[in-house]
Image (cartoon, rainbow, N blue to C red):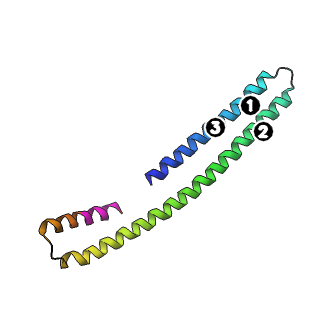
Amino acid sequence: MSEGGGVLATLITGGMAAALGGVFTAVLQAVSRHGESKASAADLVTKAAGAMVDRLEQEAKEARAELKELTRENKTLRDVVVLLTEVLDEVIPQLDAPQEALVKLKAAKRAAQRAV
């Protein structure tokens, strides 16, 4: 899930920077228009803020969908690891393999069990 967290952080950070940039640009445009009314300037900033909210909502929706998919994949992988460790519990005692190989196999099984 750490990769998913990185992706989500990137989406959120990038989205926030872009959105704040849009609002900042609107504020600068509003301030630089000396001849226009305050209502017009406020409208410009309000539209920029609304666009920011829309963009952030879309990015949040996409991030939630990606998180849902990553969570599903994580559960599937965990289930597979559990199944494989259960099979190893049954198979290892029956193996006719060098002791060194059995030790490595048992260590790998323990590591897999700790991971889930």
Q: Looking at the rendering, which quadrant does residue 64 occupy?
A: bottom right
The amino acid type of the residue labelled 3 equals Ala
Q: CA distance from mark 3 to mark 2?
A: 15 Å
Q: Who's the residue at 74% across and 42% down the image?
A: 50
Q: Where is residue 38? Give x, y as percent.
A: 84, 27
Instruction: Pick the quarter of the image with the N terminus.
Output: bottom left
Quick one: SS at disc 1?
A: helix
- What residue would you read off at disc 2? 47
Q: Which residues are magenta?
A: 108-115
Q: Main secondary structure of the magenta part?
A: helix
- What residue would you read off at disc 3? 18
Would you place residue 19 above or below residue 73 in this image?
above
The amino acid type of the residue labelled 1 equals Ala
Q: Looking at the rendering, which quadrant does residue 39 occupy?
A: top right
Q: Residues within 10 Å of mark 2 (few under 14, many from 20)?
A: some
Residue 26 image label: 1
The amino acid type of the residue labelled 2 equals Lys
Q: Who's the residue at 50% across and 59% down the image?
A: 70
